[in-house]
Image (cartoon, rainbow, N blue to C red):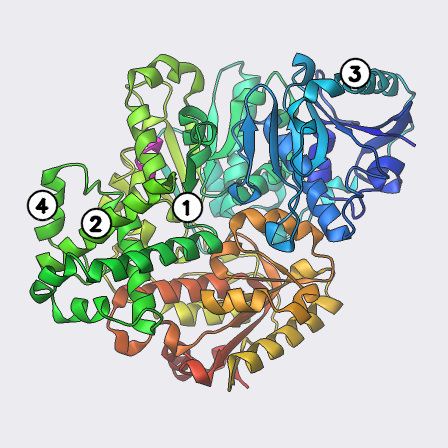
Amino acid sequence: MAKRIVIDESAINALLLRPIRDPKALVTGGAVFQEMGLRHLVVGNSSCIVSRERKSPTRLLVILFDGETPYSQFEDLNVQQEAMARSLRVAYRLFVPSIGIPRDWRPYHKPGKYVSFQASQVHLGITARIHIDPNPDKSRNAMLYYIGEQSSVEENPSAFYSEFRAALGDWQKALETPEVAAPKEKLIHTVELDRAISPGQGQGLTARQWYDLKLTKTQRDFIDYTISQPVRLKGPAGTGKTLAMVVKMLLEVYKKIDAKKKIRIGYVTHSLATADLVRDLVAVVDERGLLYNPEHQELISITTLQNLANEFLAFDLRGTEPVSLDAVDGRKTQLSFLSDILIDYRSSDWVTLARRCSPAFATYMSAEKESKESKFFLWELMNEFACVIEPEGVRDTAERRGRYLTGERRKWMMPLPIEADRQAVLDLHERFKNVMRQLGVVTIDEVISDYLRFLDSFQWNAIRQERGFDVMFVDELHLFNKQEREAFSMMGRTAEKPPVVLMAYDEKQSPRDTFLDVGAGESEQFDSLRVGKTKKFELSESFRYTPEITKALVAIDAHFPTLDFGAEWEALKVESNLPHGQKPSISVHNSASDQIREAIKSASEQASTAKDGREVAVLCLNLDLFQTYSTAGALVDKFLVLKSREDLTRLVHARKRFVISTPEQVAGLQFGHVVLVDVNEDEAPATLGMASVKRKFVSTLYLGASRARLTLEVHATKERGGLHHILKQCLSDVPSAFVAK
């Protein structure tokens, strides 16, 4: 039996797009490879997986192993699948440096030796790590040589180079093997992209065919618009923003290649998961295979802003770990730190400041640790840190600090009516930063702040002609805060001319206040990009959800609070192009346990009849209860937990398990059936008096509901205040939008 596996770069991407169920197939082969346009050949001791569309020269992943498969040490097939998927993802990212390794995988890079990462999720009790040499024998290929606990083996990858060279020899013989005619239909193109980021059907079409046959007039107008000034592409979920961006990017690159002109394009997303989805979409619709053609590989960089920063600042190589608010665990950890800081502050500086603060602020400061008021207050503090203090550089100069303490505040901000309130917030922020420093971590805001300074340096000017961009496509603009958005104008290939920026967004899909600037309003909001006057295209045709779900979304949208957000926050305008379906339902239960029992029953029934579990999602609006639900031991085999955007790569292994997550973690994805739980009054009580809390709740509700294509269920519990008053108002104002059970 073969003890080596060799996979070329194009084949890796094919396996990521359409994962195989059992890792044994990597060794034994099967019809699945032919269906994907791949050849599986056993030569000597090597199983060679060769893409029929490979470009030459190509880069290879060599996997060395002793057992039945590289992953047979794990008894659980789900863990084997996860380890295999991570191996392929990391190899792919090593070949495409602009894409990093998810932080949740706990990557470690030992320069000149190896990259290692967790084989599976740590909370499952799996502590084994996968080790890959990113440049074995100076070949520019990759070699997976060890999976296991820490030992002395991983420290010497060169001990495996003789096996590596033998694998390369087998690979050359495989290429010389006569090829059997490929099947006419290559099922690699049957990836159901509408589940993730593209509208409607049309799998198997190229970018040009999408343009000619499927796109709407507004999408084509956007694509036809000459890249001469910044462009905004606005539209609610399901209107095809990402697809239009990708098609435009590819057609622009094709034109430049045909005209023998140079261009360098950056496609920037807010999360690694979205970057992966975009890369998968490009791989399917790109008829020229630009991502795998060495001659054109440098023309397009699909990445995240944080990865661009890491590329130049190398945080991951100097023992400093950036921490973000993207993952549920990360948020909970930071909130826990802040809660302890708050308690300590009460017994020190707060004693003398308390009497000068507003009564409302003082009440929140003295709230019991686990009380509802305390939790809301902590969230508001974190939001103030991330969306006001950090982006505005309040700590940088005395002038900015003074402006923060005495200046006018916008209605959407945390209520801090007097200077003493704001001084207390600054004190807490400083203490929070000190704790982060003591732990040896930096926040994403600090990484971006350092990156902005780098982009204004002589060092960047020396390399920007080679590493900068002519054009930037920015997806998920609504998730970037003001400070992050300032980076785009500084990433051009010359200091005199910023790149042309094309951006896609739906401001109502952002549960955080990242898209609300201190100087809100349409003009100032986009002035923060520093790219000049922008041209706007607005998409209004939905290809993802039924007319009934569309009606419910419009009803929810009507409850966004009016907080001088500017013209961008106008009423939702969207029409569905899908057939009619079921009305969304609303159910109220006595307790959270009754609610989740009914939600899981409904989701399980839907998953059992759906094509696979990826079609069904239970999305929770309460983080604490989500943690409880996701660890329900007796039910854990029924669902797949997604705690961060970086977990989205695990979706391919869902099979008949449905997904359980939060709306924010699955932003960008679509499900046939969505069950929203804990849409309770206690999540944003009307009596709280914080309009910003209400806005975030409505955004989260809108984001969760807009993940549904065919059916939508809303659940609430009496023990947590009953159905939220916004949904009660929707039932009153638009009784035909929902069915109350």
Quadrant location of the C terminus in the rendered image: bottom right
Mark 1 lies on residue: 324
Q: Can residue 197 be seen in this view?
A: no
Q: Residues within 10 Å of mark 1 (few under 14, many from 20)?
A: some
Work out which residue is located at the far front of the displayed protein and give it: 152
Residue 346 painted magenta: no
In the rendered structure, which disc, 2 or 3, sits on the residue that comes first in sequence? Answer: 3
On residue 429, which mark appears?
none
Residue 488 painted magenta: yes
Mark 3 lies on residue: 162
Considering only vertical position in the picture, is 490 above or below 367? above
Question: Relative to 24, is 655 on the left or the right?
Answer: left
On residue 402, which mark appears?
4
Amino acid carrying label 1: it is Ser
Marks 4/3: CA–CA distance:
65 Å
In the rendered structure, which disc, 4 or 2, sits on the residue that comes first in sequence? Answer: 4
